[in-house]
Amino acid sequence: MTTFSAEIVSAVLAHMNSDHNGDNLLIVRAFAESAAISAAMVSLDDTEGTWQYSDGHGVEHHVSLPWGAPISERAEIRQEIVHLYERACEKLGVEARPHS
């Protein structure tokens, strides 16, 4: 069960899917499917984020990735997504851009 309002979840998903599409794909390629051709964050709650992606054959899949620990504050969502992004960069050998 999520601890975040529908408005917060909607805002985070809109931001991730409009401003961080490449990050979504990087996360999916690192932790689910290296041949993914597209990815979008589709849900989140206090324990995980979920991405939908298309594999190399155009088949849609979902992957849920746990946060480091359960979260309850909006600012923690960003921290957990940035952490996933940084781990994905490390795993794939991609240089992570700095986050302020």
Image (spheres, rainbow, N blue to C red):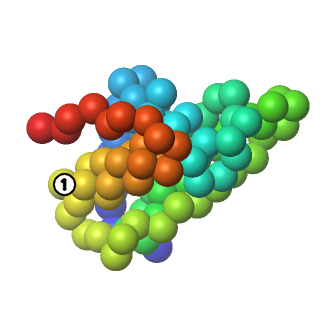
Label 1: which residue? 75
Residue 11 placed where, x, y %?
Answer: 33, 38
Residue at 43% across / 71% down in the picture? Answer: 47
Question: Residue 68, how many percent across, how many down?
Answer: 36, 71
Residue 76 in sight: yes
Left or right placement of residue 75 versus residue 29 in this view:
left
| Residue 30 versus residue 47 in the image, above or below | above
* Quadrant containing the C terminus in the rendered view: top left
Type of amino acid under label 1: Ala
Residue sitting farthest toward the front: 93
* Residue 80: image location, x then y, percent: 32, 57
Q: Residue at x 53, y 61 (%)?
A: 65
Q: For the residue labelled by badge 1, is the local secondary structure a helix, a strand or a loop?
A: helix
State whether residue 27 appears in this view.
no
Identify the residue at the far left of this view: 100
What residue sits 25% from the left and 55% below the top?
A: 79
Q: Is residue 3 left or right of residue 99?
A: right
